[in-house]
Amino acid sequence: MNLTYKLPSPLDRSVQANLEEWKSSGNVRRLWQKDASLWTNDDEAKWLGWLDIVPQQIARQDELIALAADVKKAGFTDILLLGMGGSSLCPEVLEKTYGQISGFPRLHVLDSTDPAQVKSFDNKVNPATTLFTVSSKSGSTLEPNIFKQYFYERTIQTVGKEKAGQHFIAITDPGSKMEQVAKAGNFRHIFHGVPSIGGRYSALSDFGMVPAAAIGLDIKRFLASTDKMVQACHKEVPENSAAILGVILGTAAKAGRDKVTIIASPGISDLGAWLEQLLAESTGKQGHGIIPVDREALGAPAVYGNDRVFAYVRLESKPDPAQDAAVAAIEGAGHPVIRIALQDVYDLGQEFFRWEFATAVAGSIIGINAFNQPDVEASKNVTRELTSAYEKTGSLPAEQPIFEGDGVKLFTDARNADALKPSEKSLTGYLKAHLNRITTGDYFALLGYVQMNAEHEAELQSIRHSLRDAKKVATCLGFGPRFLHSTGQAYKGGPNSGVFLQVTCDDAVDLAVPDQKYTFGIVKAAQARGDFQVLADRGRRALRVHLGPDVNAGLSKLKEAFRRALA
């Protein structure tokens, strides 16, 4: 078994008791039988199609191999996947793990409505040699639809209306609006999702495997490796490593260790972005949940509280000695550590299935429906209301900042405004008052509605780590709107232990959405407002800082204000 763990004694005793319960009750067998009573006895049974997807994909792998041959023969240089959440995160992991495979196009993934981000991808690819993959399970998700509108228009401008459709592939559930659009537009291919597989469990369905094939991944090898994990997950504990992982995560969460710090070897580092959605959106609801912590640099054991579990996925073929040493120190200090040994990058599919199975088990232990996402829908509803209002009036509703000065504005709702008692009315003063609301067992989340690039990430990472070290609490960093379809569920529906700082900006350049009155910048602003409104409605501690059009300068200013606030 390539999973080992070391837990503090009280937690270990609880885990062993739950493992014995799972074994004596035959719960692994019940899970494979799709017994909804393992969770809340609601609609869980209809969302367990992911259990059967790997043998189904193996049976039709020649179809995926034929796609790879078609893409190669057509001479496409790039693939731009247009998606969000479950339809984009697995392809992103594939791109960052495997890179460009000789003879095949390079994959790019667009999952942001930030106009600067959309424009950056527009600048990267030539529509004449690009295959656009519109990936949307429901076919009605806002972001993939407007991405498609924008890049379809760009492709028509480049190759003409008659040829444009041959530069597009759709991945969507049967009968969806996107399927109708694809047929009307004469798309090159239409691939179907499985209605009984939710977005975050869809990595091994066509939402992950079509992009995998298109970039030249050896699909037979990948699926054969993945199937080994599927077969291993039929076993009862203690032979079933996925069930053990799930029992540990669920038991730890119930015991107050509900922050799972994800550590992955550099060669598979983006796995954490996919795990964030799987864990947070599946378990974060009804006041319970697991808060995943990804891309937080490893620190000394003393900066971590007693609310963490550390999961180390180590690529055995290319480990990082510095990571090994840091994890050993954390384990030596008594923190709970789970170690997973991944032999080769072609075993990545094993981790997709292992963690899906484990998340379902953890949801059962916690006692929630691990397959719905009620609070994600709440944010979408507010966004729709705001964009509809813009279509009618030509503007978003006016806002009143609680502070304006030094090139920034601060916004929050009345309840949070009343709770903030700054010693001085300045950016630093308000930040200090906000950060002083963090207590033991809380986590801090930075929610950046700015372009996701290396410079912005470096600044935001610096901010999160300064707070982690000063307050000794778990920290999260998400770029909007993509996190709305992943960690956003846990932030709103999970435990009320988060303290949030949303970062928005003026867009230096905006982009029109073809056939709409609103722009990409308006959509992003509506998404940020919808996100904040639902956080406030859920009683979360939240503050929004609005930067000017020079985001780099604004983030530098914010970082300095943080330094002073934490001093």
Image (cartoon, rainbow, N blue to C red):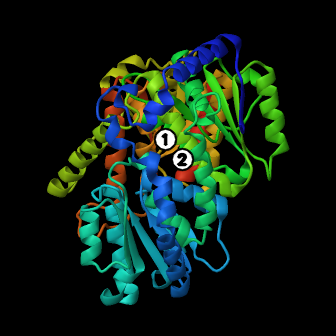
Q: Quadrant of residue 159?
A: bottom left
Q: Secondary structure at mark 1?
A: helix
Instruction: Name the residue: 31% across, 24% down.
Output: 414
- Distance from the alpha carbon under mark 2 to that under mark 1: 7 Å
Residue 140 in picture, x, y percent from top left: 27, 57
Residue 366 in picture, x, y percent from top left: 46, 22
Q: Quadrant of residue 108?
A: bottom right
Q: Residues within 10 Å of mark 2 (few under 14, many from 20)?
A: many
Identify which amino acid the numbered label 1 is placed on: Leu
Indicate which disc residue 399 carries.
none
Q: Residue 562, relative to residue 167: is it above or below?
A: above
The reply to whether the C-beta atoms of the residues labelled 2 and 1 are less than 8 Å apart is yes
Indicate which disc residue 274 carries.
2
Residue 292 in picture, x, y percent from top left: 55, 34
Instruction: Name the residue: 64% across, 28% down.
Output: 238
- 419 relative to 457 in the view: left or right: left
Q: Residue 365, relative to residue 504: is it above or below?
A: above
Looking at the rendered structure, the number of numbered marks drawn on it comes to 2
Identify which amino acid the numbered label 2 is placed on: Trp
Determine the residue located farthest toward the top in the rendered image.
10
Q: Which residue is mark 1?
A: 278
User: Toward the viewer: 228 or 515?
Assistant: 228
Instruction: Name the residue: 52% across, 62% down.
Output: 58
Q: Quadrant of the C terminus?
A: top right
